[in-house]
Image (cartoon, grey):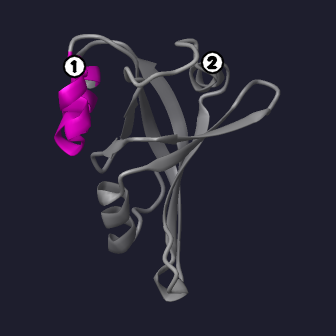
């Protein structure tokens, strides 16, 4: 992995409530979707949860299976532009469906989002995206 991001960027990665996940299929056709996520300092975890979706065969999952290179963007917008900032974590994603790493990611998500506790996100099995960042791009106005 590249150099660790600065402290303000790590704080943003840990505390932000939503990110945008960019994936691409084998022909490089991009897809960007908003995701809830948890960051443990090494990996980013995002669950495929029970919120209503048109299909369970999600394009982001197909894209990751075809091309595991992804980018995750976490940003802060403010009308006072001196407070603008973002972090982009570029890396490789994999799909987890069970096991110790899966349960760890679910535990992080359950701790961060009470909504997941209310919907009964399972620690036993499901679908979880785990991203291993390889490079961070960080920017802030000031």
Q: Which residues are magenta?
A: 102-123
Disc number placed over residue 124 in the picture, else none: none
Vertical placement of 65 versus 4: above or below? above
Return the x and y of residue 99 as percentages of the image width and height: 25, 14
Q: Is residue 135 left or right of residue 10?
A: right
The correct choice, above or below, for 5 with respect to 117 in the image is: below
- Residue occupying image coordinates x 54% and y 47%: 20
From the viewer's perspective, tell me whether residue 47 is left or right of residue 31: left
Question: Between 132 and 32, which is closer to the camera in this rendering?
Answer: 32
Q: Which residue is mark 1?
A: 100
Q: Nearer the viewer, mark 2 or mark 1?
A: 2
Main SS type for the magenta part? helix
Q: Is residue 112 magenta?
A: yes
Q: Which residue is mark 2?
A: 62
Query: Where 132 sits versus 18, above or below?
Result: above
- Counting residues from the start of the chain, the first of labels 2 and 1 encountered is 2
């Amino acid at each position: 992995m590249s150099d660790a991001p600065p402290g303000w960027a790590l704080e943003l990665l840990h505390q932000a409530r939503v990110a945008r996940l960019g994936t691409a299929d084998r022909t490089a056709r991009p897809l960007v979707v908003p995701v809830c996520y948890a960051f443990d300092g090494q990996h980013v975890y995002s669950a495929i949860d029970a919120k209503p979706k048109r299909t369970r065969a999600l394009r982001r999952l197909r894209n990751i299976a075809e091309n595991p290179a992804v980018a995750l963007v976490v940003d802060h917008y403010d009308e006072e532009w001196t407070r603008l900032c973002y972090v982009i974590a570029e890396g490789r994603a994999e799909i987890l469906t069970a096991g110790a790493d899966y349960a760890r990611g679910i535990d992080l998500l359950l701790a961060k989002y009470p909504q997941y506790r209310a919907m009964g996100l399972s620690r036993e099995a499901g679908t979880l995206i785990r991203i291993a960042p390889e490079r961070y791009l960080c920017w802030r106005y000031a």
